Image (tube, coloured by chain):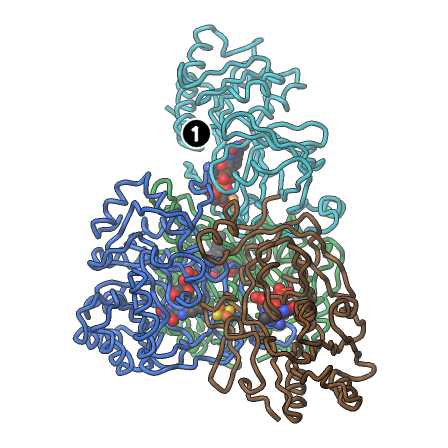
Chain colours: A cyan, B green, C blue, D brown
């Protein structure tokens, strides 16, 4: 069945990298689409380039097969396995509804990896504070840091109800704790960690990496700021290109309006003016 | 049968077969990038930007502008709505950053100029007068700023005054970029031409909007924005056609919904000397160079058209 | 998540849950057919046309008009271009054929009126004054005729004169159908309202064209035509929004690119009292009734909006 | 792979006919796509309603899967076999290029049957004069008339080169003769028939039914008119709806501009003012 209008050359990725460029939009094969919980799916595709280059909090643009829907759908990379790349997404509109109906063997157009990653260069205890559909990039952060002996990771995830991502993040994080709305939120968990003296771990000072709904991230940034814990927040905005050329994806920072896709998605609490 | 269905390797070394000349300036090929959809820092990683016919850069203002708050875009059928509001780091930054870098790469540069007032435009044009920019493109058609922008481009008297003024400030080829949100494009085009425009580019975006049915509120913070992408292609083509009918001699750059060499070719047949690719570059970073390559091949079998373009003439 | 993804059986008997009132006239639901895309003799075989909110019929002129020669249409991305040129068998034929048949079926009828001159319009309106038509829709926005049509709809003075004149000829609710091919829709809308329009409908088509790259010539015999279909949706929505901002009280019928209940709903949130479905009916004959059904369901969860519509009020 | 924007109800055809309406646009299964010659394909789909109701020269609208391409592509019904319907088409643009890449098991949206058929009510010798891609509806005409003992049919087909349709029409027509550009055109064949005294057959007077390029049909109509043979011509025009509602598909007739889709596609030589 003929679909996408976009017809990439035989092997965009190989041709681009050979010529010294980033691969443009290209078509990849889907290897799995799995339902995690109501309205939440995990989609895996084969892309050696993205698998090799993705860094924590970087995202990929997925494109609809419907040429009526031209704009990219950005999703944080949630896991990498060999040359397989996974994203986890919630069905919120027409594009994600379409993606949820894809299956192994189908194809999809992608562009990526995109965005500036979390800064994970310091030897720290990275507390990965995620809410809702902000958790996927934090799963990958845990995975990415797993082999790094100089750091420790603790996942602190808040869910509406089903703890759908715990089984993924717990593969990689040193500690996983999660909570749902019936019990409290990520601040509840952070408070508990503090009370238990677990903010530092193995002598490593805490750094918060967070992704989730805006109110949650603001609360987290302020909570951290009060304790002098540095925090990095991964932001969302509607995008035109995802690679920095159109300036539509802005958030307000203390240095003016910045592009989520290429100045971010990661910003520090200071940049966002979110200190307590 | 579609003529361009052999996939093109945009990374392959390519000798351009068909150039164009716009207001005396030679373009390697008739396809440029459209202003606001190209930033060197972003696009250079995806393809050899110097290979474009020309690069029209993001509108520059006398001082840095912060534009509209987010969200700035919404999707629409086969298109998009945007309300960036001309965020840019200002002409001084442009002169030390984007422009020299582009020239160093060997690009033909069209510098897009933005302003809220005649004086704003004049300041920018004056600063660009001695710069290495190859052409200036005066944007009097941005629907997303409340002063200047589109309001000048929809009023032939105001437009004539502005262009007449700018004409005195520079000898560089000056393109005036027109708005489609007007009753009578021929009058506006004529006003620009008579006031000293060397060329016209059209169209800028059509005013439009989207509403989120979950909230009942506009998706874009600015409420309305400008519609671009394939959806506007027939409208853009109609504007170029009408301006060409009204003004047989002025060079025209056709813009709007171009995502293939075939659509570019329609603009050339409508009377354009060159085209620019906008929205398509957003959802497909290498679209501009692909369109240029597809057109280069399509022109092979149209020697009469190709010869006219190379001589600075047009099909109509 | 899309709210209307359960397929609707358009043939099922359905009790409308949400009506609207446009200039005092009750519509069974807020969805009508758009003029020029509905002919009883064609559409009645596909669905129960009396179930539409209203039926806006093809523009009628004082005498039969033959319109433009073929080809009259070309495809465009997510849309189409047409240049019918208002071919119709004239008002006398309409009065003995289309109109009585529609009324017999129980339809709410909006009679679309075409003219080349003020006198043409006046003749038709006078003949319709005592007819069973529920509303008149004065088409001053057709881009495909050389006299009258769009030229009146783009000039507030001419429009005011025409509508003032027609107002004296009929007490029927009179809708004025506006063109998007204007610089300043608010002024035009105000001129129509002040001259006596009971309601406004918008948009008519955007001027556009396509060229056949095999020949280099326009596909449509009239060269340019009017663009309709999903492609124009955000533009149409923006026009309705701006007219609503300028005129808080006048009833508005939103038209342009509607192919789903969700798109219809966006128009209602922009401030329309009702909508009309045009091009979608061409590529999907039952689209108008499907859109009406989808909207009826969407309004279930929006009681505040539904109540306003039923009371002849609007969201904004 | 999700495609068409159009999502018909479970069974539009059954629901519509049950309610007393014509079926609207609906999705059918393709059972075969066969290449007949360079750039010419035969596509077969399953549609009991169209199979049952189609009359000679009626056409069906086929729709692209690409929602960028909304207008119908009309094609004459070329054969019916049980509940299978075939069309034969040439690849001339993007839509037909797409259709040529479809395969058995794919789906496609259709609307039909549409248009006014040839008048085949008289007991006559129907001479089916076709050129190029005008031949498909004439194949079906021959098929439709095959079981009618009161009539005779002779196919007179002109091709550019490959006689790709002969094998189909010869299944049904009493006589099949064809020619390609290297030898002449359909007028050559008609002249030969006249010379051989074969214009009437079994005492039945000739009626010409023709479909093909405009210059050919004009020549045929004039040839017939000179001999007082009635002729019916099946016309083409770009369409908006195909079912008579939009008035875009006009041709000029002596009675003014008429709709090809619902006043036609069949017009008489007199209607077209094409008498010699
Ligand atoms: C950097 C980044 C990373 C993200 N990572 C994830 C993730 O890992 N998992 C996940 O479920 N979601 C993530 N999102 C949100 C996700 O991009 C949107 O939910 C998705 O684009 C909605 O598409 P749709 O077609 O279903 O919605 P529609 O409303 O039909 O889409 C219409 C347009 O709006 C855009 N849009 C709608 N909602 C959003 C949004 N919240 N953010 C950005 N654009 C939006 C779409 O991309 C599209 O262009 C991320 C967003 C950003 C910016
Ligand atoms: C009543 C009727 C019966 C037909 N029967 C046959 C047939 O049996 N076999 C066959 O090969 N062709 C037939 N045609 C012509 C066929 O419809 C076109 O070749 C086809 O629509 C081209 O589609 P495209 O997408 O490939 O072309 P594009 O040029 O990409 O199409 C763009 C638009 O133009 C329209 N269009 C382009 N050419 C024509 C044309 N010649 N006639 C009408 N619309 C056109 C398309 O339908 C579409 O809306 C028939 C046409 C009509 C009107
Ligand atoms: C995100 C975005 C930003 C734009 N910014 C500018 C600008 O700064 N100056 C300008 O003259 N046009 C600007 N435009 C208009 C484009 O240059 C072009 O005229 C328009 O988008 C139509 O072409 P398209 O359909 O190919 O996008 C912008 C368009 C987009 C989509
Ligand atoms: C084929 C065709 C014929 C039309 N004829 C008329 C007409 O006679 N009178 C009129 O007011 N509008 C006419 N219109 C405009 C439509 O009513 C409508 O305003 C426009 O098409 C936009 O809506 P859409 O995108 O839903 O088609 C016509 C549109 C089409 C496509
Ligand atoms: S989405 Fe284009 S700059 Fe960020
Ligand atoms: S195609 Fe619409 S009336 Fe013939």
Q: Name the chain letter of the residue that bears numbered label 1.
A: A
- For residue A113, side relative to residue B113 (left or right): right
Query: In this orientation, does residue B113 appear?
Result: no
Question: Looking at the image, is B121 positioned above or below residue B156?
Answer: above
Question: Looking at the image, is A161 positioned above or below residue C101?
Answer: above
Residue that appears at 57% across and 56% down: D49
Residue B284: x percent and y percent? 60, 51
- For residue D40, side relative to residue B176 (left or right): right
Q: Which image quadrant for residue D98?
A: bottom right
Identify the element where label 1 is drawn. loop
Q: Which image quadrant for residue B278?
A: bottom right
Task: Work out which quarter of the rendered image holds the C terminus of chain B and state it.
Answer: bottom right
Q: Which residue, given by chain and number where applicable, does mark 1 sit on? A: A213
Residue that appears at 43% across and 7% down: A195
- For residue D100, side relative to residue B263 (left or right): right
Residue A239: x percent and y percent? 50, 44
Query: In this orientation, does residue A180 appear?
Result: yes
Residue that appears at 57% across and 82% down: D268
Instruction: Give the class, few, some or many, for how many residues have Cα within 10 Å of label 1's Cα (few <14, many ≥20).
Output: some
Residue B301: x percent and y percent? 72, 73
Task: Work out which quarter of the rendered image holds the N terminus of chain B and state it.
Answer: bottom right
In this orientation, which residue lies closer to the viewer: B221 or D224?
Answer: D224
């Amino acid at each position: 069945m003929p679909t996408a209008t976009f017809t990439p050359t035989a092997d965009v990725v190989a041709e681009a990298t050979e010529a010294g460029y980033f691969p443009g939009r290209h078509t990849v094969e889907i290897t799995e689409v799995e339902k995690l919980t109501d309205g939440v799916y995990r989609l895996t595709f084969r892309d050696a380039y993205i698998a090799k280059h993705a860094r924590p909090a970087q995202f990929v643009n997925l494109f609809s097969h419907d040429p009526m829907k031209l704009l990219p759908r950005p999703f944080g990379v949630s896991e990498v396995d060999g040359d397989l790349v996974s994203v986890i997404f919630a069905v919120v509109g027409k594009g994600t509804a379409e993606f949820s109906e894809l299956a192994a063997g189908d194809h999809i157009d992608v562009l990526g990896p995109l965005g500036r990653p979390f800064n994970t260069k310091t030897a720290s205890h990275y507390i990965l504070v995620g809410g809702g559909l902000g958790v996927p990039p934090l799963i990958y952060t845990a995975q990415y840091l797993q082999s790094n002996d100089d750091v420790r990771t603790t996942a602190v995830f808040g869910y509406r109800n089903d703890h759908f991502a715990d089984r993924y993040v717990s593969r990689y994080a040193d500690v996983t704790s999660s909570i749902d709305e019936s019990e409290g939120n990520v601040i509840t968990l952070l408070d508990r960690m503090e009370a238990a003296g677990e903010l530092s771990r193995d002598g490593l000072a805490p750094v918060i990496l967070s992704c989730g709904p805006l109110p949650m991230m603001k609360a987290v940034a302020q909570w951290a700021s009060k304790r002098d814990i540095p925090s990095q927040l991964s932001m969302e905005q509607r995008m035109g290109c995802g690679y920095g050329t159109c300036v539509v994806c802005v958030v307000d920072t203390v240095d003016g309006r910045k592009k989520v896709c290429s100045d971010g998605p990661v910003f520090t609490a200071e940049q966002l003016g979110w200190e307590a | 049968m579609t003529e361009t269905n052999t996939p093109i390797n945009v990374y392959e070394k390519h000798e351009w077969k068909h150039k164009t000349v716009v207001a005396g300036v030679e373009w390697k090929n008739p396809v440029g990038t459209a202003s606001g959809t190209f930033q060197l820092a972003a696009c250079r990683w995806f393809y050899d930007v110097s290979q474009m016919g020309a690069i029209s850069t993001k509108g520059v203002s006398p001082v840095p502008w912060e534009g509209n708050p987010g969200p700035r875009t919404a999707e629409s059928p086969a298109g998009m709505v945007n309300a960036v509001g001309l965020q840019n780091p200002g002409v001084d930054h442009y002169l030390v950053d984007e422009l020299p870098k582009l020239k160093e790469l060997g690009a033909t540069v069209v510098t897009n100029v933005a302003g809220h007032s005649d004086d704003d435009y004049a300041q920018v044009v004056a600063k660009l007068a001695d710069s290495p920019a190859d052409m200036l493109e005066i944007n009097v058609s941005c629907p997303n700023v409340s002063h200047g922008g589109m309001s000048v481009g929809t009023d032939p008297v105001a437009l004539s005054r502005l262009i007449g003024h700018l004409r005195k400030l520079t000898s560089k080829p000056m393109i005036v970029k027109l708005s489609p949100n007007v009753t009578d494009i021929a009058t506006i085009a004529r006003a620009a031409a008579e006031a000293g425009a060397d060329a016209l580019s059209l169209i800028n975006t059509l005013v439009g909007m989207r509403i989120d049915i979950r909230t009942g509120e506009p998706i874009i913070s600015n409420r309305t924005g400008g519609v671009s992408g394939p959806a506007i292609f027939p409208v853009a083509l109609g504007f170029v056609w009408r301006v060409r009918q009204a003004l047989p001699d002025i060079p025209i750059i056709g813009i709007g919904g171009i995502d293939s060499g075939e659509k570019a070719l329609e603009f050339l047949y409508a009377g354009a000397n060159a085209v620019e690719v906008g929205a398509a570059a957003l959802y497909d970073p290498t679209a501009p160079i692909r369109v240029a390559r597809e057109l280069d091949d399509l022109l092979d079998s149209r020697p009469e058209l190709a010869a006219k373009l190379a001589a600075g003439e047009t099909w109509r």
